Amino acid sequence: MMPPWAFKAARDQASMHLQVLALNSRAERQAGKIRARVVRAFRDQENNVYPGKMVEFDVPVIAPSPGLPEPGGPIELHGSNLAASRWLEGFFDHYEGKLHLVRSQIAPIRRPSWRPVYPPEFEGFVFPGNL
């Protein structure tokens, strides 16, 4: 497992910081498959997105089956937490023609805002959101 400061560094270095509205079903969101419309782009270093653009990305979620988690893999989020809101804020990179979540850095939020909900000074692993 990486130390908490490494996750902050990953957020700081991500090419995109976005708020999106998930358009797919709760079950799909719970499974970590997100199809969404960009609502806010706080950072987009490569000009890959704009408000209204449709995007798709995957989020690593904890499998419902019993067993031990694999050490050293990506942080897996609870699908039910991810599906709790259709509004999400996260950090992304764009390569191979698609959006990729950076180090599982995504959080459910109440609604879009003019300023980031995910605080830049947050130094933990994953921000829990503001629901």
Image (tube, helix red, strand yellow):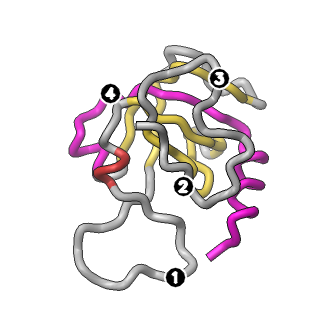
Q: Position of residue 48 (x, y in %)?
A: 66, 27
> In this rendering, which labeled residue sits more in front, label 1 or label 3?
3
Q: In which quarter of the image is the C terminus?
A: top left
Q: Is 58 positioned to the left or the right of 12 in the image?
A: left
Is residue 11 highlighted in magenta?
A: yes
Do the numbered discs 4 and 3 sit on residues whose CB atoms are within 8 Å? no
The residue singled out by tag 4 in the image is: 23
Q: Which residue is drawn at 75% across and 30% down?
A: 46
Q: Residue at x 56, y 55 (%)?
A: 126
Q: Where is residue 103 in the image (x, y as percent from the top left)?
A: 60, 57
Distance between mark 1 and mark 3 Cα atoms: 35 Å
Do the numbered discs 1 and 3 sit on residues whose CB atoms are within 8 Å? no
The residue singled out by tag 2 in the image is: 104
Badge 2 or badge 1: first in the primary sequence: 1
Distance between mark 2 and mark 3 Cα atoms: 21 Å
Q: Position of residue 55 (x, y in %)?
A: 48, 31
